[in-house]
Image (cartoon, rainbow, N blue to C red):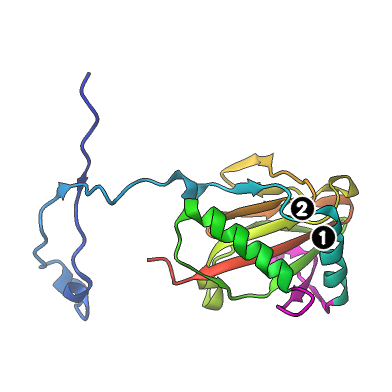
Amino acid sequence: MSGARQYMLFPLPPAQLVAGKSQADLATLALPPPRPMPAILHSNPALAQARVIEGVFTPDECEKIMAIGAKRPREDARVQSYGGSARVGHVAWVDPAADTIWVYQRLATIVAWVNQAFQFELLGFADALQYTVYEPGHKFDWHVDIGAGQASNRKVSITVQLSEESAYEGGDLQFISAPDMAMPKGRGTAILFPSYLAHRVSDVTSGLRCSLVAWASGVPFR
């Protein structure tokens, strides 16, 4: 049998070489030949995975966060998509304040720790934390968290399970790469994943599902 295959890199032209050119001009550019793959272009399987960290918050701390979220103004989180409702639920925004800074500090520490695997260029939380409440019939269909405007800077998404696992049925956090595998629902568990991974919250069939959602932002992907 032959040895490991040697991949070759066909390089892209420098940005300054294509700047201001028309499409016709691009066809005439002289490009360098392929060369051996540089060692710096290493693989990183973590970029396609979610990380589960249990016990980020204690049950008492989860109760405190839920009480904080319940005091914030609640918004209807309904999102329309292709004529139907892609998201049905309620949210409240939790800004940094005297009673919430400990939550931000805890999440910032966990994000920095997990980012050792992702290796993203992160700056911090550019959005307020989102307290989410799903009642029976509520859901959030397949979507990604990175988007237009400020959302284009989202790199790591965080979901913290605040409700007791026995407090509701349905409401599974799932990823499109493994739609039949639901993430753990243990109270105080944080699930962190690259914001470009498609995911959903399946229909809540009974009870009340409460969670805390955050996004760590950084310079745009490049």
Image side of residue 75 versus residue 5, left or right: right
Specify the label residue 111 is tagged with: none
Q: Residue at x 21, y 81 (%)?
A: 20
Question: Furthest-top residue in view?
Answer: 1
Q: Secondary structure at mark 1?
A: helix
Residue 175 can be seen in this image = no
Q: Amino acid at mark 2?
A: Gly
Residue 101, percent from left and from top? 72, 73
Q: Quadrant of residue 62?
A: bottom right
| 46 vs 169, nearest the viewer | 46
| The C terminus sits in image quarter | bottom left
Relative to residue 211, is residue 183 drawn left or right?
Answer: left
Q: Are marks 2 and 1 in contact (CB under 8 Å)?
A: yes
Instruction: Looking at the picture, tell me which residue is in the foreground, 30 or 116.
Output: 116
Provide the residue span drawn in magenta: 72-100
- Quadrant where the image shows the N terminus: top left
Give the image location of residue 57, x and y in percent.
76, 56
Q: Nearer the viewer, residue 57 or 159?
A: 57
x, y (%) of residue 156? 56, 61
In this rendering, does residue 113 appear at all?
yes
Determine the secondary structure under disc 2.
loop
Q: Which of 84/180 is in front?
A: 180
Residue 96 lies in magenta, yes or no? yes
Question: As shown in the figure, which amino acid type bears the numbered disc 1?
Answer: Glu
Mark 2 or 1: the one toward you: 1
Q: Residue at x 44, y 72 (%)?
A: 219
Q: Where is residue 66, by image quadrant? A: bottom right
Mark 2 — residue? 188
Query: Residue visible at 68% across and 63% down?
Result: 106
Location of mark 1 (residue): 61
Place of residue 208 in the rendered image (x, y in percent of width and height, measured from the top left): 88, 56
Question: Circle 1: is it few (<14), some (14-19), or many (20+) Cα within 10 Å?
Answer: some
